[in-house]
Image (tube, rainbow, N blue to C red):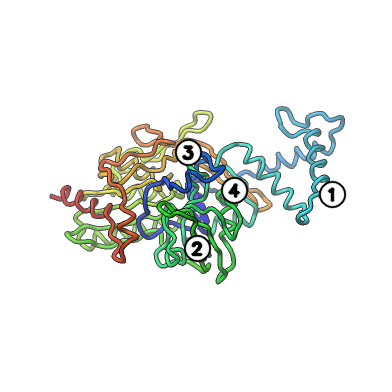
Amino acid sequence: MDENQSYFDNISGAGMGMNPQGKPPGKERGSGKGLFLIGLITGISGALLILAICYLGIYIQSAVESGQSMAQSVQKNSGGASFLEDSAIDADVLNKMQTIENTIQNYFYLHDVTEEEIQDGIYKGMLQALDDPYSEYYTAQELEELMQQTEGIYYGIGAYVSQDTVSGLPKISGTIAGAPAEEADLRANDLIYEVDGVSTYGLSLTEAVSLIKGPENTDVTLTIVREGESDYLQVTVTRRKVETPTVEHKMLEDGMAYIQLTEFDDVSVKQFENALASVRASGMKGMILDLRANPGGSLGAVVDMARMILPEGMIVYTEDKSGKRSEYKCDGKKELDVPLVVLVDMNSASAAEIMAGAIKDYKLGTLVGTTTFGKGIVQQIIPFRDGSAVKVTISAYYTPNGNNIHGLGIEPDVVCEFDGEAYYGSEDRPDNQLEKAKEVLRELMR
């Protein structure tokens, strides 16, 4: 799923309600202010929301039991010998961990630290050692919040948050229509420098999002770096419950249908199916599929949705560290039979790139906008008996033509930069990319 990571406020942003927006993103990445902030260098790449295969059952029960057995071996160990061959954890490491814990308990001044906090820090540190922005440890509470986000109901400010690859800061990728973030005039590509005075630099996306989350009807103040502004912006937003459909649709002029996918969650599959049925019943002659600011989501969801429009053949395939290949195919029985234009931008990531990549490879539609994010790897969430979990990168994915777009993104067929000044400078919110998509679609419909 996400977690791109959507997801978060979600592995998507906002368990606080951070989810994809219901409107197009702002200017392309490159905030001048963000680029010269002291100490901000190229950060870890991230994307909201996550491309993850999430198993809710105790899939790795045997692995947990193995870990318990290792711990028992440690207790029996003596003489400082390693208790498991090729393991980084031996008696010397455990002794040092105990020494560090004693040092913290004896000398740390700012506040009392619980055993649980230290333990969670150890687990999080192990995942951070992988130097992979997409691999991390979730406490039981964090995992529960992550799972709730796939159901389309959030508590927070109603924005989707990803991680900016240039500054390393969390970034607003979009806002939900009618949500607190939109009402407070937060915009796509706003960099979140501080949350209630706490710096977000160096934090993981999950850690930054947790600062933004909070009880309903409470306020959170974000310090924002926005391109074109000479100083920081202080934006106070009141958290509240946000219910967000991940699929929106409507009929435009000349028989053109418009379907916007803001995320690929569990709830998205049925919503997309219903949207397709609705626009077909309304006499659709051509379709615009809007994937802008879509951070991704569930591999299973995007595959199911792709099967509703793609021709027969490969949708996507993955390869793991041992070269094992998993293929996801379409029977072509529901292939889209009208001209198609797909809107993409720099915040279209992960599962959104799987959909866009397959459409482009099959020449089923024309891509309009700007180059996509470039996340071509897959994460899996592996839960443990105590309710916690780890998310780890397990494979790379490839488009039907065998392209891995990681770090590259997908180039549009028709380049069209978003005019953020016009959009945010007018109450009418003119969307030049959408107008370009209409223009291209009219030509295809002739």
N-term mark: 1 or 3: 1
Q: Residue furthest bottom?
A: 217
Residue type, label 1: Asn
Residue 40, quarter of the rendered image: top right
Label 2 to label 1: alpha-carbon separation = 40 Å
Q: Which residue is mark 3?
A: 377
Residue 117, how many percent across, how many down?
A: 72, 52
Residue sticking out furthest to the right: 79
Residue type (three-letter) at the residue carrying disc 3: Ile
Foreground: 203 or 84?
203
> Closer to the observer: label 3 or label 2?
2
Q: Given the image, on which type of amino acid does mark 4 rest?
A: Leu
Identify which residue is drawn at 34% across, 60% down: 424
Q: Amino acid at mark 2?
A: Val
Q: Nearer the viewer, mark 4 or mark 3?
A: 4
* Residue indicated by mark 1: 106
For residue 429, which quarter of the picture? bottom left
The answer, for residue 264, to whether it is visible in the render is no
Judged from the image, the secondary structure of the residue bearing numbered disc 2 is strand
User: Which x, y percent locates residue 130?
Assistant: 60, 36
**Residue at image location 82% in from the left, 50% down from the top:** 105
Find the residue positioned furthest to the left. 446
**Residue at the disc numbered 2:** 235
CA–CA distance in space, label 4 to label 1: 26 Å
Helix, strand or loop under label 1: helix
Secondary structure state at the residue bearing disc 3: strand
Q: Are marks 2 and 1 in contact (CB under 8 Å)?
A: no
Residue 203 image label: 4
Name the residue at 35% across, 36% down. 400
How far apart are the alpha carbons under marks 1 and 3? Answer: 43 Å
Query: Which label sits in the foreground, 1 or 3?
Result: 1
Q: As drawn, is 443 to the left or to the right of 88?
A: left
